Image: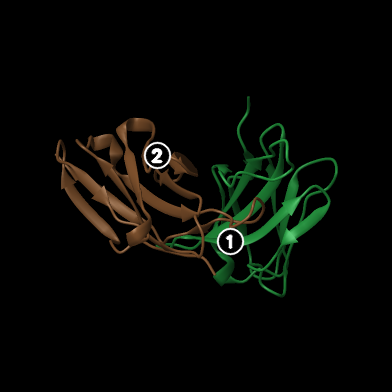
Chain colours: A brown, B green
Amino acid sequence: AQSVTQPDIHITVSEGASLELRCNYSYGATPYLFWYVQSPGQGLQLLLKYFSGDTLVQGIKGFEAEFKRSQSSFNLRKPSVHWSDAAEYFCAVGPPTNAGKSTFGDGTTLTVKP
Amino acid sequence: NAGVMQNPRHLVRRRGQEARLRCSPMKGHSHVYWYRQLPEEGLKFMVYLQKENIIDESGMPKERFSAEFPKEGPSILRIQQVVRGDSAAYFCASSPTVLTGSNTGELFFGEGSRLTVL
């Protein structure tokens, strides 16, 4: 069975500081990996995705993530956080075949200090 | 191109009543998923549907919950005889269908329907 662990429930960073959100997954083959962002009262928006190829993927809003097979990780990074980045972030692993459902982590809430 | 549309955005029901949540996927998407988000928790998969077919309902409670995605019209998540524990945000997502007939796994979410049971 596939699973996703986001070890940090809540992270606080200062505006302008760098950010790294951790994500570890469990799956038997190469997964499809995603990061989504959810602002309060809103739905989820896709930040970036990894299917294959280059293990460093670029997303929207200046985010990037690196797939490390040896560590079963897909950590999200941003060099300089903006106050508008405060939100909840979800890592997800996609379907093992080309049909099915995604499994989400429990999320990391990001607070940005002025 | 309109995104995934969910309605109602907010729904209040008394215990024992029925709740119906509707979801219209993005144009051209034939895969629909329902997720539930309880307060302070992540998203939990409920059901995956394609037109007129339930593909995976492994996350659906065995009783009181049902889902459909008819040939015409939106997908419906139906909760009968609601209880306070059903209070949550219910999110619908859709995904595109590539030429092979499979989906890429990328999900496009609606803004959710927030159910409050009094």
| Residue at the spot of label 2 | A54
Per the image, label 2 sits on a secondary structure element best described as loop
Amino acid carrying label 2: it is: Asp
Q: With B47 as the anchor, is B45 left or right in this view?
A: left
In the rendered view of the protein, which quadrant contains the N terminus of chain B? top right
Q: Are marks 2 and 1 on the same chain?
A: no
Image mark for residue B45:
1
Between the C-alphas of marks 2 and 1, the distance is 29 Å
How far across and how far down the image is residue B16, in percent? Answer: 69, 70
Q: Residue at x 66, y 45 (%)?
A: B103
Q: Residue at x 31, y 53 (%)?
A: A109
How far across and how far down the image is residue A114, in percent? Answer: 14, 39
Foreground label between 2 and 1: 2
Q: With B6 as the anchor, is A52 left or right in this view?
A: left
Per the image, label 1 sits on a secondary structure element best described as strand
How far across and how far down the image is residue B116, in percent? Answer: 55, 59
